[in-house]
Each structure stands twice: as C-alpha cells, then as structure tokens.
Image (cartoon, rainbow, N blue to C red):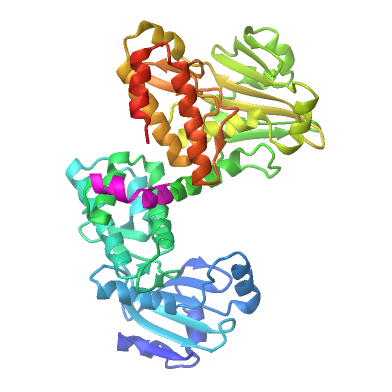
Amino acid sequence: MNKRVFNDKSLEHLFDDGNAFKIAKNLEGKIYRDYANRKTKQFFFRGSSYFIKYHGPVGWREILKNFIQLKIPVIGAEREWKALLKLRSVGLDCSEPLAFMSRGWNPANSESFLITKDLQKTISLEDFFLKGAFKKRSTLEKRSLITKLAIICRTMHLNGLNHRDLYLCHFHIDESDKLGERIFLIDLHRGQIRKRVPLRWATKDIGGLLHSIIPFGISETDCYRFLMVYFDCSFEHLIKEKTTFINQSRSRAFDMHMKPILKEIDITNSNKLEENSLYLKKKGMDYRWIGLKSALNDPILNALEDLDKIMQTGRVIKKEAGHFIVSLELGGKEFFIKKYQIKGKSHLLRKFFSQSRANISWKAIHWLRAVNINTVNPVVIYERFNSLFALEAFLITEKIEGTILSDVLKENEKDYLIAARIQSLFKRLKWIGFNHGDAKTSNFYFNQDKLIVFDLDASRKSISSMMKTNMINKDIKRILRSTIKNKRLNLLLSRRLKD
C-alpha cells in the first residue's frame, strides 16, 4: 500500500531529487542500528536534527520463520508511525512523528520509512541508572519517577497499545537529571494497537520493564508501589485481585533475567565464554568444569587436577552412598567440597535422563540468588563424564558462616525472626517457581539473623502453576515436620505459610 504523509512540509524537499526510498536508505548520518532490512539513523537537515527509520523488504522466508516460531514479524514502519500518533493522542510524550512513506502491497517486498524529531539532550533511564544517579535521589524523587512510569504504562495499556520492548532503555528523560520532569517513550516498531490490551501482552510489557530494573536493585516495595499506581488500587486490592497479573509479569521478568546467566554458567555448553565473563571454564577428554573467576585462587585450580586426592586431606562432614562432603582450607580460606556419586544400578539408569545433582544445585543457587535468597557462595562445578552422562560430579562452595538452623532452634530465642525469614524464603521461591526439595532445618544455616539455604540438589523449577503449588506445599510440610519439637515456631509457621 502506497502512503505519503508529511506533518513537517519542509522535509518533503529532502526527496525532490529522485527515488524517495533510495534517498531515505542512503541518507548521510550517524547509524544507531543496522539490521538486515532495517536502519535507524540520525541526520541533519537545514540545521535541525532528525531520526529516520528505514524498513526494507523482509522476504517470505523471514515472515514464515517468525510464524513458525509463533512470533509476529516486524514489517514496515507503519506500526511505529501509528503507535507514535496514538501515544500523542492520549497525552503521552514520545518522539514526534514528522513524516511517513510506504510503497508495495506485498508484505515481503514492501518498503517504508518514518522520520521523527530528535529528542535532543535526553538520556535513557537505563543510562541514568547505570551511572548510579537514581540511588543519589531522595525518596520523594524516586517515588515520583516510579509513579510517572506507572502512569505511562497504565495510560498506554488502557488505550489499547502495548509496546513489546518495554525496557528502561526506551524511556528518555532530560540529560540534566531533572528526574522524570518529562519522560519520553521511544522505539515502538513492534507496538500493537487494539481496543483492549490482552492480559498476556500487558504482563509481557510490565515483566519486561521489571526485568530491565532487576540489576539495579529496586525494592519489592517499589514494585508494589508501581503496580498500585498502574492499577489505581489499594495494596489490599492488588494482592487479592491481581495475583495472576503479578505472578505472570514477575515470572517473565526473572525468566528473562536468568536466561543469559543460565547460558553462561551451563557446564555442558561447549561455546567459549566472553572475555568479560565472570566465569572461567575448561574441558578435557573426560572432564569439564566452570567456576567463578573471582573465587578461583591457585590452590583451587591445583585441587581441580585431582579432587579425590585433595578431599582425602579434608575434614569429613558427611560420607554415605550418594554423598561425600569435606571441609578444607585452600589458600587461607575454608571451602566445602561435595562429591555426588552413583549409588547403584537403578541410580545409574536414572542418570540417562537427568543432569548431575551438582549441576542441579549449581543452577538452583544462581536462581535463588536472583531473588535475594541467601545461599552458599558457589565457586566451581566439576564433572567427569562419558559419552552419555556425568559419572561423578563435584560442587565447591565457600564455607558457610553461622549455625545449623536445627541447632539454633534448641535455644528457643529467635522463633519470631526465624518464622519471618522462612516465610520470606517461601514467598520468593514462589516468585520464580522453585522448591527446595528437602526443606528441613538441617539444610539451613542461620548467621547474623540471616537464613542461608544450602543442599539444593533436589530443588526443581516448576513448569506449571499446579506443579509449583504441589512442590511448594511439599516443602512446607517438610519444614513443619522438622520444627515439630519447637511448638511455638511450628505454630507461627503454620499460620504464616498458609496460602
């Protein structure tokens, strides 16, 4: 479909000398994005700065690939043009749309471009957070920014528009740090306009925004404050009526947050790590390991040459059919080394269909730490393997400071605090759909009023809400059974852990 719209008539003169689409594609300027069929470029015309987004033919192959992957292909600039007009019509700040042209009826071979006014002297909220400016602001200023972001999202969704790339980097504020005086929303090339935004797409937007904020340590209270403004409701109404929305958006946020982390820490992944990775890995003919660079001192690296030998020098903590755990000093620091062994023939058969328990624990530690659950500090996972599965696996962690929770309970002095910490643990496990798998007091430490989780080789991430509920309920039953001798704590937990 051929269209030609110029809200700024002066820009028409850019295309007086020939093929408008060829001129648009080849305009001189600073390139910000350059994909196979899309270019985003800043250019100057008659002393003013503009941005042009050119969309070339995508081809049927790309369209079919997107449909097979259940994705909506990005075809042309019209989607963003309409989204920008929609935002301005409902009073939201965005890049000012100045011109749009398109040609071609065939979606695979069409061309289009749009031109917007440059948002001069602005900075993305991502950059604002990266330079630590948010932390320096007063509580009142922080709350004001959260409120304004929530109002933008609320207004957008109530008017039938969802962004599909709603991250901090797509919100811009004045670079002079006038925090949120005006907030501009940009990059709507994937935006969708309907009469009503479905729950699925609303939670994807809010989940994406939360995901982009996670690295900056925004508090749980801030998230609830955002949602109360977004829904224009009280906290009580939010918790009671909007649990599905909260759970879906939070689940999306943490899944997105963990995806690159899990890829990086995957011991079975043969791809090389980036130079700036926090991890180091090595693979031989029949072994592989990956560890945290900052924790890998020379004694640990030497120990990896023969872990069985070095374990013989440690203090035995547990030695049974499936586990062998020792504590020992390496380079002036105490570590736990846990060896996971094959128990027998039935256990060997099960390993055809599962990852090593060391790997389960390694991944679970990273998941739990993403929601600020205190765990053992991971150092290295090491596996010996054949062509089918890991034969033996080792997990090295820093020694946990503190006291086993089962011993703390004998003092009978911190029942209320412990109950609160356990309640918080289960709440955060629900956020990411995890269970501990063996939640008993002997699998927790208590140090400086902090609950520390360990022994996570039976933990699992649920794949459905029903599975999550069942797994969490099993953990709750375990923790209640293990506190039965402490009647006051048991009663407190029974009340606090009820759904």
Q: Is residue 374 left or right of residue 175?
A: right
| Residue at 48% from the left image edge and 93% from the top image edge | 18
Point 60% across, 13% down: residue: 330
Q: Quadrant of residue 449?
A: top left
Residue 141 percent location from the top left of the image: 19, 47
**Residue 424 occupies quadrant:** top left
Secondary structure mostly taken by the magenta-highlighted segment of the chain: helix
Taking 338 as reference, is 126 above or below it? Answer: below
Res. 257 in view? yes
Q: Is residue 104 left or right of residue 392?
A: left
Q: Is residue 106 magenta?
A: no
Verify whether residue 244 appears in magenta.
yes
Q: Which residues are magenta?
A: 236-250
In the picture, residue 374 is in which quadrant?
A: top left
List x then y, in percent, for residue 40. 46, 71
- Asked whether, in this view, residue 102 is left or right of residue 313, the answer is left
Q: How far from the left and from the top, in percent, is residue 451?
A: 41, 21
- Depth order, front residue of 319/298: 319
Q: Is residue 202 above or below residue 160?
A: above
Residue 316 pos. (x, y %): 63, 7
Q: Nearer the viewer, residue 477 or 8?
A: 477
**Residue at x 52%, y 35% (from the top left corner):** 471
Residue 109, compared with residue 398, is above or below; it is: below
